Image (cartoon, rainbow, N blue to C red):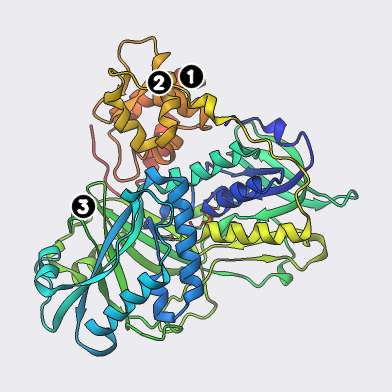
Amino acid sequence: MTRDIKKLSSDVLDILVVGGGIHGATIAYHVAMAGYHAVIIDKNDFCGATSANSLKILHGGLRYLQHLNITRMRHSITARREMMHLASHLVEPLPCMMPLYGKGLRGKKVMQAALFLNDFIGWDRNHDLPAGLHIPKGHIVSKKKCLEVIPDLETEDLQAASVWYDVLAVNTERVVLEYVLQSVNHGAKAANYVEATGVEKGADDLYHVTVLDKLSQQKHLLKTRFIVNASGPWFEDFLHVPQESVKKQKWALALNVVSRKKIFADYAVALEGQSKYEDKDALIKRGKRLYFFVPWRGYTMIGTEYEESSVNPDCLQVKREMIQNMVDEINAIYPPAQLKYEDISFFHAGLLPMRGKLEDSNIQLEKNSTFFEHKESNFNRVLSVKGVKYTTAPYIAHEIVCFLKKQCPPVLSKEKQNESSSYAGQWSANESALRGMLEKKYGQRALQILQFLRAEQDDDIWIDKDAQLLKAEVNYLISEEMVCKLSDIVFRRTGLGTADCPERKLLVKLSDFMGKILGWDEARKEEEREEVLHRYSPLTCKEA
Ligand SMILES: Cc1cc2nc3c(=O)[nH]c(=O)nc-3n(C[C@H](O)[C@H](O)[C@H](O)COP(=O)(O)OP(=O)(O)OC[C@H]3O[C@@H](n4cnc5c(N)ncnc54)[C@H](O)[C@@H]3O)c2cc1C
């Protein structure tokens, strides 16, 4: 996948996808698979915004049973299965546990029935998946087992615990990238750091979209029949639709923290928060919001906390007090955690669409991801996506393809690239020591890295052995995965910095290596490092 902005505008497009988060990426893949001539652009790197900030749970939809929303459950189950097929090396089943207190609607019997229904509705959840990814059935476990997993839990009225399985997307950023790479394999073109800045309907009845290449500061014009606006929290911005014709969307800032403390081994644990929360649409009301403690890479991700926000998404900032409040809330929910501010190594923050009215400080997010056609005559072939869940993005993409096929069936033949040549090769005995590490990160693409490894001239193959980062990996990422900045590698290609701040000496080695390939001087290298370190503010980074 190479970044060639001139090529994007070389012919008329069927579909321009604006935004390379999970929605844009899945849409680009589905439309390219359907045979449309598509381009996907992102004003920053792919998966640089909300999609990089999720709790990484691909839901099966057990929680939607509370609303008896079977349709939404089915959408989640089928969408999740597609992601598991496409990025099988990046996902794993996630056992989840929730303590059960009291009787009646919140007790053991009702939960047993819910787990049965959940498995029944998801009867095909494992269809065609490799055995290692099969999602087991849910069940009830004893109070004793519950206390083994969640020691020192409040035991008054504790009856048992429910166990069910969701899926953890271990690296959400690479799942998005996998969709972008696959869309390119199916004939789409892609470019990061390209911003759509304006749209006009031309006399030729095509949309003329002005885009800015943020790396060269040059403007280009793309002509397209349809636009899919998948720009997340920016979705009301780039079209410049007249204000009176759009109902101003309200947004909630959603926050997770990542703790260096491993709080519970093996299970994601769901515990009730302190303050009252009423889910207006739920038939079975819990009265409290659930917090998830998700074990991940030896850390614990905890979330999700919400507050209303009217901040410009370009200026989204998390203040120290927000993180401190969350630490306090976590200690109140589960006092044995004894979490301190200094234990927090990273956080996830993003804007999600919420419903209009804020009642009793209850944030009600929009229930379903949707897309809509613009009614204004100038924008009648523009579809805007409003996404609330990472999990269901492939379902929205599928719906968009169905919609487009009715409007304008694809006329171009697919230009599928031949992948087999790039995957040619076998691991020799010497190389097989690296195979497990590379396949875990890159799946089948590890074979492409092997070609770079074989071409390596230097005896020292590592950029940093402790960080398990090879020179061949970085060469591959720059050459084949459109890496333009240090932050692309640290956050969105390798996950080196997505749990904790990397040591400065690693950033120096990596920026020196990248600088040689990309022609960076010392000032540029320092700028790149500062950009990476800024992402951890207001946390305390490890010094070295
Ligand atoms: C804290 C938190 C926890 C969450 N947990 C979960 C979870 O566990 N499971 C789950 O399923 N969902 C979860 N979600 C929800 C999920 O992350 C989002 O619904 C989803 O990622 C939204 O994706 P998107 O593609 O719509 O938006 P984004 O990921 O924000 O993508 C939009 C992209 O558009 C680009 N863009 C904007 N304007 C332009 C322009 N003019 N030109 C070019 N590009 C542009 C941006 O740079 C951005 O990359 C969570 C969200 C948060 C914030």
Name the amino acid type tagged 1. Ile
Could you give the CA–CA distance between mark 3 and mark 2, rounded to whole angstroms?
A: 31 Å
Who's the residue at 62% across and 70% down the image?
A: 248
Which quadrant holds the N terminus? top right
Give the residue number, with chain letter if any, for mark 1: 517
In the figure, residue 414 lies in which quadrant?
top right
Question: In this orientation, does residue 236 appear?
Answer: no
Q: Are marks 3 and 2 in contact (CB under 8 Å)?
A: no
Task: Please say if 540 is above or below 168.
Answer: above
Q: Residue furthest bottom?
A: 104
Question: In this orientation, does residue 440 appear?
Answer: yes
Please tell me how crowded label 1 is: few (under 14), some (14-19), or many (20+) other residues with Cα within 10 Å.
Answer: few
Name the disc covering residue 343, or none: 3
- The x, y position of residue 40, in whole percent, is 63, 44
Which quadrant holds the C terminus? top left
Q: Are marks 1 and 2 in contact (CB under 8 Å)?
A: yes
Task: Please say if 156 is above or below 213.
Answer: below
Q: Earlier in the sequence, mark 3 or mark 2?
A: 3
Q: Earlier in the sequence, mark 3 or mark 1?
A: 3
- The x, y position of residue 277, in whole percent, is 35, 81
- The x, y position of residue 215, in whole percent, is 60, 33
Name the disc covering residue 327, or none: none
Could you give the CA–CA distance between mark 1 and mark 2, rounded to whole angstroms?
A: 7 Å
In the figure, residue 32 lies in which quadrant?
top right
Give the residue number, with chain letter if any, for mark 2: 513
Name the amino acid type tagged 2. Phe
